[in-house]
Image: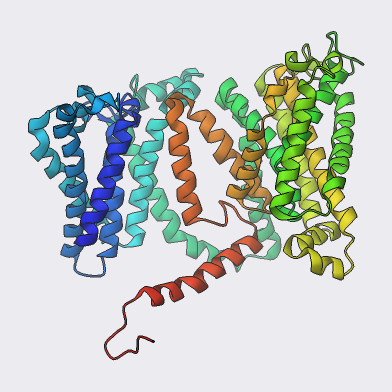
Amino acid sequence: MRDALAVGLLSGAVAVYLALVGVVEQLHGRLVLAEPVRLSLGQVALFLAGLVGAMAVARRAAAGSPAAAVLAGALAGVSAGAVLSMLVLAGPALNVRAMFVNASPPLFDLITLGRGPGGVPAILALWGALGAAAGAAARLPAGARRPLAWGAAAVLLLSIFQELAQLILQAGERTAVVADLLFTSDSPTPGAAAVVFVATVALNALWRARGEGFRRRTETIPPAARRVLRMAGPALAVVAALLLPAVGGAFISQVLVIVGLYTLMGLGLNLEVGFAGLLDLGFVAFFAIGAYTVGLLTSVGSLGIAQMSFWAALPVAVIVALVAGVVLGIPVLGIRGDYLAIATLGFGEIVRLLVLSDFLRPWLGGSQGLLDIPKPVFGGVELVGPEHLFYVTLAFSALVAYVAWRLQDSRLGRVWMAIREDEDVAEALGVDLVSAKLLAYGLGAAFAGVGGAIFAVMLGSVFPHSFQLLISINVLALIIVGGLGSLPGVIVGALALVGLPELLREFGEFRFLVYGALLVVMMLLRPEGLWPAAEQRRELREHVEATEPALEAAAAPPTAGEPTGG
């Protein structure tokens, strides 16, 4: 009970924070369910702060009787509601709004569901009931609890992305009818939410129930047929990717092009960091070199030097980026660890400042950049819109991913991994560190140069302010989130760290608050990444499984008669 009280107070403090910084009011404009239920996303954010704490406490108490779990959840819920009630009661008297501008009467009405200060007892009862429900859910078997959680998450996602879904569905006459059935002007209908919830629960339960049986049946299938089944998933993914521009429209295509550019950079940096263990914080420099090379060679403006086509300039950009990677890698061959990160960070800043300098302004345009970069032409068709450039980005991403995949298990790839694990041992075994490191820098830079080339023709101009340090940090973050050394992890990381924030732009600056919280949760639950390499998963999971029992044993109080040590 003491833990329930403490966690409940902490959950209430989180809810108060979300309310005072404006997250709740910002999200209140988006409805999860329309009339007659009328539940807003802001109210869901408040309730989730209490429900998560109540669920955590109830799961710890779930070893006892069901009543103990329900009581612990109810106490945590009431405690969280009490903290919010204190804000409602004391906020006007203490003039909290002088410090927090969002502490307004509309916020207090939102917290009390329009009842005002007189509705505090009802709010406490509601929060207690929600906590008790969380406690009861904690007693459910995992096979029942997880489908329900997936169903609730599906309804939330339907609400969050309802504008995007309506935009896609309204594009066609037949799909527009489906949009009218699923959505009102600003929210999903209760019927649509119920259908999505039930369908998600049923599909999740069916998947879990039949998954093991399906795996057992596939073991009896001949190897040739099993290989065909394994290829069915990637084949469907390729077909879905090819159809996305036609289905999603210009906005989705634009987001996917940006994801593709970060994927190209991520695949290049993954060679250096994930394979060879060479930390590089100036990777954006090679992206900029590829963009400026294509810009100079193709621009029809005053700074253009050759007026070449994109397809003729692209190999030159790749070679220039590769040479730049080798040249910039030579001075840092003997540097390791954090010192290497600082040195490469300096290279990135040097390239950006050189482009901005007055000395190179007559050739690179300085802060004015390069303008009048034409779009690529393929088969007599000018690739103007993001729908066209998506296919260009997809083709080069697939090509670069194939090259990286072939390198991973090659002799060179194994040399890189030996350097990553222990550079001194690798050198003692005869590995040529100089050539291996320079190849990692050069090939990684070449991949980034491809991304920079596509970026230049996508915008039709190149500006030095587009190549900030934050891009290098984002690329490094996405390969860590996806899984170091994992090629599919790079794609998943780009979708999670680049695509998702772009799709959540309508939530304003608070999207980064949610984004950061999700990253923290992901690092706690999946430290190896969303789609890690087999070696990374094995190392981290075995370490966690080996240390958790020891930590639990050390934290447990000694039993009667057990020596405590001296």
Instruction: Please identify the residue farthest to the front as the structure is shown.
Output: 566
Residue 396 makes an appearance in the image: no
Q: Is residue 37 above or below residue 376?
A: below
Could you tell me which residue is drawn at 34 percent across and 76 percent down? 556
Q: Position of residue 509 (x, y in %)?
A: 45, 27
Asked whether residue 366 appears in the rendered view, the answer is yes
Where does residue 503 sit, x and y in percent of width and height?
A: 51, 29
Q: Nearer the viewer, residue 185 or 227?
A: 185
Q: Is residue 427 above or below residue 105?
A: below
Horizontal placement of 78 versus 149: left or right?
Answer: left
For image coordinates 90% across by 54% down, the residue present is: 435
In the rendered image, the vertical position of residue 2 relative to residue 384, given as above or below: below
Q: In terms of depth relative to the viewer, which is nearer, 397 or 10?
A: 10
Looking at this view, is 520 or 236 the one in front? 520
| Relative side of 360 to 421, left or right | right
- Seen from this angle, which residue lies furthest top? 302
Q: Residue at x 29, y 51 (%)?
A: 53
Of residue 351 and residue 99, the one placed in the foreground of this image is: 99
Give residue 287's quadrant in the image: top right
Side of 322 relative to 372 (left or right): right
Q: Position of residue 97 (x, y in %)?
A: 25, 25
Which quadrant would residue 139 be assigned to in this image? bottom left
Residue 356 point in image, percent of width and height:
76, 21
Residue 34 sits above or below residue 302 on the image: below
> Where does the N terminus fall, quadrant-wise?
bottom left
Position of 256 with respect to 23 (left or right) is: right
